[in-house]
Image: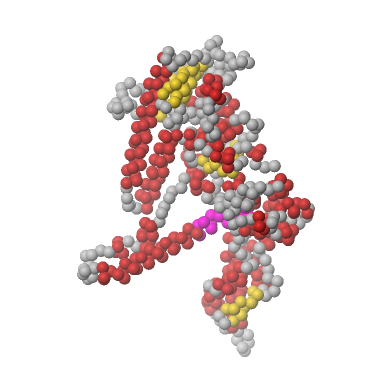
Amino acid sequence: MTALSPDTDPRISEEQEHLDRVYGRLDRMRQTTQRRLSSTLSERGGTPQALSERESYERMYNEDLAKFDAAEHNLYFGRLDLDDGEIRRIGRIGVLDDGLGDDGTHDHTATDATLLLDWRAPLARPFYLATPAAPEEVARRRHIRTRSRKVRGVSDESLTAGDALLDDFGHGDVVNESALVAALNAARTGEMTDIVETIQREQDLIIRSTHRGVTVIQGGPGTGKTAVALHRAAYLLYTHREILSRSGILIIGPNDDFLSYIGQVLPSLGESGVLLSTIGDLFPGVRARSEDRRVTTGVKGGLRMVDVLKRAVRAKQSLPSRPEPVDFDGYRVEIDSELVKAARAKARSTRRAHNQSQNAFLKAGLAELARRHASTIGSSLLDGSQLLSPADIADIRDDMSQDPDIRAALLKFWPTLTPQDMLRELLTDERAIRRATPGWSDDDRAALLREPRTFSITGEDFSPADVPLLDELAELIGYGTDDAERAERARWRRQLAEAQDALDILTGSAPQDLEDELDPEILMAYDLIDAEQLASRQTETRRATTAERAYGDRTWTFGHVIVDEAQELSP
């Protein structure tokens, strides 16, 4: 390995010339992207499809600009000289030559199609794997240290037999030794930085291992677990871009401080489509920050809790202890155990989640209640036969379905549930815990019990151990995407009604607004647009990133999950 001073090292001027070309190309890429973004933002109107396409382009251009900005620091850091004379230059992102000089005119000396190889590309891998014992057809590996677009130092490693430098133990397998020493001596900033220049052979094997869906990284302090996890995420996004750009990558860390510490690593590698989260933040709407006792965490993490939660949900599908009277249309009808039991059996037979089978329960209960009411008011005084037709009974059922008192009386025995409320009620009710835990010891039951005042509506008083329970309850209850879709449909209906009201007002005031109200040539807004079009134009659309959509969707399936510091996540 050789290293000369900047004043006497001819390699620095050689690499500076190449670095200038790379940054010149990066600047032109940035300018072109900014110009395209500005043009996209200036466009107005068009069909909904055109609007969607503009939003897609806007997001793409913004992501490209962020990638270019992130690559500004230490853009070019490595070079490989192969045995056959080929030269490969390695950087944070791939940069292709456009054949132009710094002044924008054609540069006839520009012959290389690739100015920089992305460090994740297969052709760049020998930079991290080559050793004197296994040179990977590499004659020389060069490390380039830059700062503020200036080459500050160059060091070479010869991998040719007989020329290789051995380490202190007589081995020739220390990869990127000079860059590694420089990184170890660099000043600390309080945030983790990437190790793209100093990845070691063993780390690279993990980073580029086969995509299997889940990667669990464990190890002792200081063994590079986190750095490997983050660089693996960047590698997977590069290698499986088409799939993972749609499904995303989830990185799970032990706490907020840890995520803050590592938060800038992936952006510095040009990647933003990754969700970093603690276990406590994985359930939408909940930030679980309470800490359980170790014994409580152990009990909550047991498989027995699945059956406990099932029993707790079924307990909400209750029967009345005595008939409950409800006034309807001047009569009194009764909801008794027999009616509710039959409706409950009908709902359970659907084998759907609790909330999703509520409609079946309500429909069966209303049908029986209407039949009973019809037999009371429509029976013949002579022989007791039913005088009302099936259509009449159907009308009674429809009227009952619109009666808030009857609906409330029925739904008391099959209520709409939320995971948060269910878990709060269970964990703060000693009797509910006892009913849901047959055969449990008193100590295990006591481990679950919490004081009601320890919970708040913010969700922060849940613990990380509660999050899997909330998720299981959401499955049992049927809570999540369907609720969000219903809320979105309700929002759209409100917006549509408001748009129609606005058009009605314009229509009503038209004669006062026109000097010649009979002139058929004068067009008004309501002649050109309907309520749906007006509502669509008033809708604020925001195309969220993959990570943002995944964060708000409990049912999201990630393309890859990385669990870092796994030993800290469970007792």
Residue 256 x %, y %: 58, 42
Is 132 drawn above or below residue 448 in the view shown?
above
Quarter-of-image position of residue 228: top right
Segment colored magenta: 470-486
* Residue at x 21%, y 65% (from the top left corner): 521
* Residue at x 30%, y 70% (from the top left corner): 509
* Viewer-side residue, 369 vs 9: 9
Residue 415 x %, y %: 61, 64
* Viewer-side residue, 471 vs 338: 471
Q: Horizontal placement of 64 versus 385: left or right?
A: left
* Residue at x 67%, y 61% (from the top left corner): 314
Give the prevailing secondary structure in the magenta stretch: helix
Residue 21 x %, y %: 37, 25
Residue 489 x %, y %: 47, 60
* Viewer-side residue, 479 vs 467: 467
Is 90 drawn above or below residue 526 in the view shown?
above
Q: Horizontal placement of 205 versus 70: left or right?
A: right
* Viewer-side residue, 410 vs 227: 227
Query: Is 475 in the magenta?
Result: yes
Q: Quadrant of the C terminus?
A: top right
Quarter-of-image position of residue 403: bottom right
Query: Is 409 in the magenta?
Result: no
